[in-house]
Amino acid sequence: MRRWYLLLAVPFLGLLYPPLYAREDPELFGFPFFYWYQFGWVPLTAALTYFVYRKTRTVERPAPARTGRFERT
Amino acid sequence: MNGGFEVDGVAIAVFCALFLLVTVLGFVAARWKRGDLGLLDEWGLGGRRFGTVITWFLLGGDLFTAYTFIAVPALVWAVGAGGFFALPYTILVFPLVFMVMPRLWSVASKHRYVTAADYVKGRFSSRGLATAIAFTGLLATMPYIALQLVGIQVVLGGLGIEGEWPLIIAFAILAAYTYTSGLRAPALIALVKDTLIYATVIVAIIYIPSKLGGWDAIFSAASEELPQRDEPGALVPGTPDAHVAYATLALGSAMALFLYPHALTAVLSSRSQDVVRRNMALLPAWTFLLGLMALLGYMAIAAGLNVTEPNNAVPALFVDMFPSWFLGVALAAIAIGALVPAAVMSIAAANLFTRNVWKEFVNPHVSDREESQIAKIVSLLVKVGALAFVIFLPTQFAIDLQLLGGVWMLQTLPAVLLALYTRWFHRWALLAGWLVGMVVGTWIAASQEFAPVWEVPVLGVTAYTALVALGLNLVVSVVITLVLGGSGRADELDETRPEEYDELVETREPAPTVGGGVT
């Protein structure tokens, strides 16, 4: 269960060693590699985080005991 | 400050109309998700009832400040790739927060903690350590609020407006609705701010490159221009030193961000730890936006604009590219973008002062109503202070202090974030580590004219000062803990229990009260 959290280390490995991506080629849509590589990690990290979120949610959300969020008195 | 822009009547009219809209929203917010604003939990944390969507808007609007949107492109304009560390920084921050912040939310909700210092006091039963945490937060927040004003000033300059009075009016309005509505005001205004910012950036990254000959041309222009600067920049960081600086700046900034009081305030105002976790998968949408915004720096280079100082790069680009009416929208987006974080920061500072200074040292028996009243007044004083800061001191002073702010905030990491996992550390050891980190970090930064990175003597690498100071901080904390032995670790000093960190609770609707239940 907790081991899913290890997936969150992946973006750190991909981004904290700049020699891995500090170059200009190959380009994509006019963007040097340095730029589009890092932009690519944005959706990738979001997807990983969402995946871990789904996998580590221990309990389903508590049944709505409330009658409505905007309830007025 | 004014970059010599001409007065643009249409742009000013659009700008003022949008500003008026958010002013009305700011006051209406007091009636939204009705609660008793005479309580600090309601005024200062919105009753801890914000759901996924509101939290997304509030956190996004709060963390990605107006100053960020001015300063990041300015840095990219000035130094090139080095300024782009903002992207890995804001990518890595969210998985990091995903791991730790839900634990803090749960325990804070259980014990009604409003600030990080509240938590530290409960966890370690140490007034000294809690005061140190509160002091750090206040110290780092003040210049950050001042920088939001700098952001507004730059924007007003773009409209051709000079002088200080428009700034004073804008801040007086902000102060008034923060006073009456508390955290609800920035939460509601964030909806408008975020929509405007997204619209502006999307238009900018489609429209401007089409006028400049495409991304290819923009990057080529930057790659030619940057090495010719007085301090040569580069399109891609080349040297090993630049690589270490880049990575440590990204990591250190990511670790520091959520220790800031304004970030914590927004996290604690959400309804459940589930909302916090889900948001960490959704907030990277902001990261993407910031990355695109950073590239405006290169567009300013490609457009061949005569930029008088880096901070004027974005306004100059907008003035050059956009028709008047959209210039008004774009500049309003940034100015309103300053109001959300400025409001949250002043609320966070007020919470800190009220809970951890006033209640702690002046009047421990303060009633709930008085507590909220004091916080409201402090939120006003904080803004007056920030305004005086910007008007009477050089802008560079605020910028230097904000850089120090990151160094300072990171020194609270052992006592706040590591404490969420372990009580192994001795409280006096944490206090000593904090002190060493603060003094050494400040000294390093000040001794080299506030450059963010430092050449570490023994290791021979150039790294982010804040991380170096944190390293020393941790060494001191560990060594002193070992020396003192287990004496400070007795569990009876800890008012939190392990299971309270994982509880999946949700804030319930408040019972109707006399003050807030009348509709």
Image (tube, coloured by chain):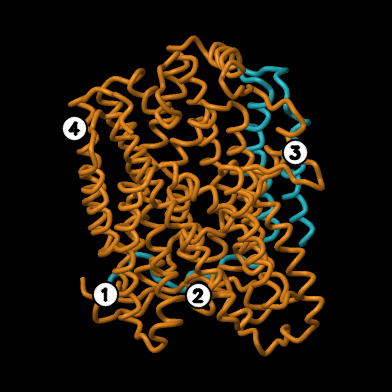
Chain colours: A cyan, B orange
Nearer to us in this view, B320 or B181: B320
Amino acid under label 3?
A: Gly
Marks 3/1: CA–CA distance: 50 Å
- Chain letter of the residue carrying label 1: B
The circle on residue B13 is 4
Name which residue lies at 39% across and 22% down.
B317
Say yes or no: labels 1 and 4 on the same chain. yes
Crowding at mark 2 (Cα within 10 Å: few <14, some 14-19, many 20+): many
Residue most extreme to the front? B447
Amino acid under label 1?
A: Gly
- Residue at mark 3: A14
Marks 4/2: CA–CA distance: 44 Å
Name which residue lies at 75% across and 46% down.
B456
Give whichever of discs 2 and 1 has the lower sequence position: 2
Amino acid under label 2?
A: Tyr
Residue contact between numbered discs 2 and 1, judged by CB atoms under 8 Å: no
Quarter holding the N terminus of chain B is top left
Crowding at mark 1 (Cα within 10 Å: few <14, some 14-19, many 20+): some
